[in-house]
Image (spheres, rainbow, N blue to C red):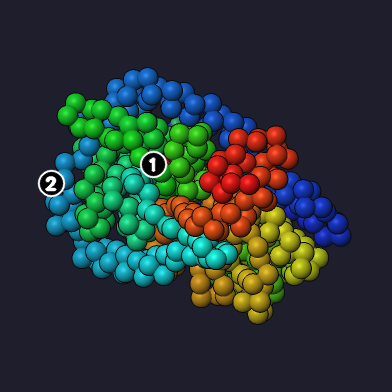
Amino acid sequence: MTTAETTTTPALRTIDLRGRQLSWAELRAAVPRQSTSSLASAEQAVEEIIAAVRAEGAAALRRYARRFDGVEQQRLRVDPAEIRRAVDALDPAVRRGLQTAIQRTRAFAAAQRPADARLEVAPGAVLVQRWTPIRRAGLYVPGGLAVYPSSVVMNVVPAQAAGVGSIVLCSPPQREFDGLPHPTILAAAGLLGVDEVWAVGGAQSLAAMAHGVVDGEDVLEPVDTVTGPGNVYVATAKRLLRSVVGVDAEAGTTEIAVLADDTANPAYVAADLISQAEHDPAAGSVLITHSPALAERVAAELAVQVPRTRHRERVATALSGPQSGAVLTDDLDASIAVADAYAAEHLEIHTAAPQEVAARVRNAGAIFVGPYSPVPLGDYAAGSNHVLPTGGTAVHAQGLSTTSFLKAVQVVEYSREALAEIGADIVALADSEDLPAHGAAITIRTGG
Ligand SMILES: NC(=O)c1ccc[n+]([C@@H]2O[C@H](COP(=O)([O-])OP(=O)(O)OC[C@H]3O[C@@H](n4cnc5c(N)ncnc54)[C@H](O)[C@@H]3O)[C@@H](O)[C@H]2O)c1
Ligand SMILES: N[C@H](CO)Cc1c[nH]c[nH+]1
Ligand SMILES: [Zn+2]
């Protein structure tokens, strides 16, 4: 066997849960995950980066661009003329693809806008929940191992659908493009009418957007929320900046879980596992099945398909890491329980009656139902959003949507009569908390 064959022969390790009755906590611990030591070392690095950006501002951004992106930067903010140039130079097929993605994502984003709620809870007692857009949003678009114009669409479209008035976009400077973000990223921003783009990447860009930065005449005003996907450094920065700025979800290193039975097409399953593994050597690809025969057929397909794929070394690393594996279960119910515990960023369902299975799943960033809904469809142009929670956070978090850029304000208006009608109840509750001044603020209006 040659070295090349060794490095690209994938080995999905088997996690055999058959015959084991595991509690929820045990299941959460048994599913494949990123190693905790790699997450801890990223956290340490990101803490230092955030502190440096706060202390040194633009000088720290330039230093990190030199260190991580190999770029010596002049201006950090992209001249709007560069954005217009990128739109003009856009390849027609890519332009068409972006326009399709924008159109479908925009249609679904508009459908996601929630209605205000109004209730007269008693005569003269009016409650309103009013949705308002966030003032200014900072959007991250990755550009390291790969570049992500599609993430421009996924960030900007829901922000615009929510009515966000001020948008700034950050993406890593690219050495081969004179320290600008990738031209297709600039073009996607231009197609969407975004003109504030900064060539800043990684954790440092999140810190810059959260705290603000002055670079000569250019000022990056602080934002009220940051959103967007990225690698472990980006996701860690979002977690650490949560007390300073709003964040969507930890949309970190990509994961896919495929829940399959013996009706699944193993070639499709293998292709989909590989498709997400090509993002990052730390990406997670997980097969969940109660069919050992299917697991074997998928392994055989991986052995054929991985050596043929362009990023085979990255893929093979991802597939053989602790974050990937084939989980064997006793039956379909157990597979669904594993999928819920894993809480995948993307969950594909390849079973008989996949809609019924999908309806029973509680935890996933997005669910892809049946053999003709592979994850790459959602990555680009299904109309759904590809910025999705990772690392098991889908038990409480959700993908980016229009509501990520909205917040609800509750508005209360009672008449004098409505206040008097409920006054004694409030005074009793205030007294029970030994906060009599609260009660007094009622009785000064209503007497009694
Ligand atoms: N969950 C989601 O919604 C989603 C969507 C798309 C992509 N992704 C993920 O986004 C990631 C994109 O990663 P990428 O690397 O291509 O681009 P990226 O823009 O996320 O990361 C590149 C940046 O990482 C920083 N960096 C690199 N090495 C570093 C180090 N040692 N210490 C500190 N910072 C460092 C640099 O600033 C660099 O500019 C992938 O992991 C992919 O799986 C996730
Ligand atoms: N699969 C990624 C989300 O984890 C999104 C993406 C963009 N481009 C290709 N894929
Ligand atoms: Zn993808």
Disc assigned to residue 224: 1
Q: Is residue 345 left or right of residue 407?
A: right
Packing grade of label 2 (10 A; few <14, some 14-19, many >=20) is few
Residue, disc 2 = 81
Of the residues shown, which amino acid type is indicated by label 1? Asp
Q: Is residue 150 left or right of residue 78?
A: right
Residue sitting at the far bottom: 353
* Residue at image location 75% in from the left, 70% down from the top: 332
Residue 216: image location, x then y, percent: 19, 26
Q: Is residue 29 left or right of residue 259?
A: right
2 vs 1, front mark: 1
Residue 426: image location, x then y, percent: 65, 48
* Residue at image location 82% in from the left, 60% down from the top: 18
Of the residues shown, which amino acid type is indicated by label 2? Ala
Q: Could you tell me if residue 220 is visible in this image?
A: yes
Q: Could you tell me if residue 11 is visible in this image?
A: no
Residue in the foreground of this view, choosing between 365 and 2: 365
Residue in the foreground of this view, choosing between 302 and 277: 277
Quarter of the image where one finds residue 384: bottom left
Which badge, 2 or 1, comes first in the chain's sequence?
A: 2
